[in-house]
Image (cartoon, rainbow, N blue to C red):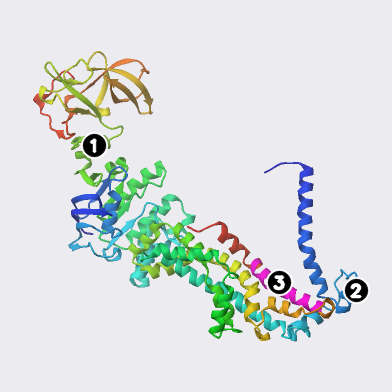
Amino acid sequence: MAELAFRDVRKTYAGLEVIHGVTTDVTDGEFVVIVGPSGCGKSTLLRMVAGLEQITSGEIRIGSRVVNNLEPKDRDIAMVFQNYALYPHMSVYENMSYGLRIKGFSRQEIDSRVQKAAAILELKPFLERRPRQLSGGQRQRVAMGRAIVRQPQAFLMDEPLSNLDAQLRAEMRLEIRALQRKLGITMVYVTHDQVEAMSMADRVVLMRAGRIEQNGTPVELYENPANTFVARFIGTPPMNLLRLVAARGGAIIAGTEGPVVLGGRFASGQLGVRPEHMQLAFETGVRAGVDSVEYLGGDSLVSCRVGDQPVAVRVAGSVGLARGDATWIRWAPGAQHYFDDAGLRTPIEARDEPVTLIA
Amino acid sequence: MVENRPWLTFFSHAVLIAGVLAVAFPLYVTFVASTLTLEQIMQVPMPLIPGDQLLQNYSQVLGAGTTTGSRAPVSSMLVNSTVMALVIPLGKITISVISAFALVYFRFPLRGFIFWMIFVTLMLPVEVRIIPTFKVIADLGMLNTYAGLTVPLIASATATFLFRQFFMTVPDELAEAARVDGAGPMRFFWDVLLPLSKTTMAALFVIQFIYGWNQYLWPLLITTDESMYTAVIGIKRMIVGSDAANEWNLIMATAILAMLPPALVVVLMQKWFVKGLVETEK
């Protein structure tokens, strides 16, 4: 296993730049998830590491080697594709050993590696089957096995779980993560699903339109989102963003009559509060009208309107509210994020926050 | 459509049976005629019960041939037909699969133009270009040779097009996975694409075997030597002059013999043939 380095990596298609200079590192044995909405360039970036796309400018290093001009086979990486790309006419054993056979490994070496990988992935009973005779989860494992047997410097995974049903996806998340820890794999994992990113990653690289929006641990992204895009992308439902206006004594939420939520210097820009940090209250906090209530079992999602701005509140259990009801919302001062006019997060100091909203 | 209407069932079966009879009756007459003596055939009406000349007629055509028109034994015609019907599909498949591979997986100048050139030749059947083709083959001294019989019919836009369409449905990720696994283009072609194309090739083989076996106009033009006659041409050459001058019992025996190999290929390869047309292993 080795570390990866990206230095101002750019990609241009027919004069149109789609990756605008990505610089980041993946340390040895680290699980990095590249996440972002579709079309953000995350898959392109991964394919550039694999050597399936040319790097227009910049530099990608695997270990100590610059791999810009190396063929995929010489980069010492393994890739797991979204549709697994198993060879349909080969058995599981042949699928896993194909790369090794091409590289000219001895029969015993191939067999011992395949058997070992099959044991780890619990594929031993299926070695003679064709991919067509396997379930989605098993195919996924074969694709993993094909990567493992090569003992590469790094694993690249392109949305490997998106073809599985929700339950299996949750299981495979844990499995892949456990496997990565056990084998000490350096992993770059691309997904559009922020839940996968948050639950699996050591570090998340959040991309939008060919740029890195934020690069940090899942906790950092959740607690200190760099801007409104990150704030809205991470977390379900996304963070509530509320426009602020100046009022006597500080800033209040636009369209309300108070209370004051932040100091006067925050009077323009947006206030961010996560739905799970909000509570419903009675005659304290901000007035809100209920739009709809979604009961999810463990908790309920209450969609409200504060002034003319939509707000989602997540509360435990069920609530006795219905469309048209009036209620109050409050939250702890520490739960507040402030984003300036450009959408960038500005730290709030304790003295900027009034105590009136304390839950 | 699942409906239970007895009259409809009866009617549809009646139509089907009538259809089968219409198709099968001439075949039956051919067979009966091939087991009779020439005198029996010339009776009016011709008997419709098989006679006792089966072995006699068949061994004569296979061994010696007819005495009027063509004098070549049918066994040599069958060999010629077999060579033609095997070389054409095998050649077609080999060339088409390679050119389709080049068209789909390689980027080279004028790729689109070349594809359209190949595609346009679909509109020019053998018959349209038969005179210039004949001239070329004659100038090359390939009249009355196996090469002359087969080479002009090998190039095939249809098969190239078929393989191109099939290759385009193979997911790109498969080629990429092979690249990551370290397989070069030819290795990918050999280890992945060809095995995946097996059923398509089988279907094409069946169609082209029959196409090759049934060739009429082209062998008629370029074979003047009796030893190079194919079975289909042999039948034509056996028929000379007036009705009464022909050995119809022997001609019918030849016709039956000429019908058997294609039927056999279809029956034996039916499973593969259907697979190739309806399912792809991806």
Relative to A14, residue B46 above or below: below
Q: Residues within 10 Å of mark 2 (few under 14, many from 20)?
A: few
The dot on residue A74 is none
How far apart marks 2 and 1 lie (CA) works out to: 96 Å
- Label 2 lies in what chain? B
- Label 1 lies in what chain? A
Magenta: main secondary structure equals helix
Element at label 2: loop
**Quarter of the figure with residue B180:** bottom left
Relative to A211, residue B206 above or below: below
How far apart marks 3 and 1 lie (CA) works out to: 74 Å
Q: Out of B68 and A58, give the one closest to the viewer.
A: B68
Mark 1: amino acid? Phe
Residue A192's spot in the image, x, y percent? 32, 44
> Going 25% across and 60% down the picture, which residue do you hit?
A153
Task: Tell whether position B256 is magenta.
Answer: yes
Q: Which residues are magenta?
A: B247-266
- Which residue does the numbered mark 1 point to in the structure image? A229
The dot on residue B259 is 3
- Which residue does the numbered mark 2 point to in the structure image? B43
Q: Residues within 10 Å of mark 1 (few under 14, many from 20)?
A: some
Residue ranking furthest to the right: B44
Q: Out of B130 and B111, give the one closest to the viewer.
A: B130
Say if residue B2 shows up in the picture: yes
Mark 2: amino acid? Gln
**Quarter of the figure with residue B111:** bottom left
Q: Are marks 3 and 1 on the same chain?
A: no
> Going 81% across and 77% down the picture, which residue do you hit?
B248
The answer to which of marks 3 and 2 sits earlier in the sequence is: 2
> Going 70% across and 74% down the picture, which residue do you hit?
B258
Say if residue A202 shows up in the picture: no
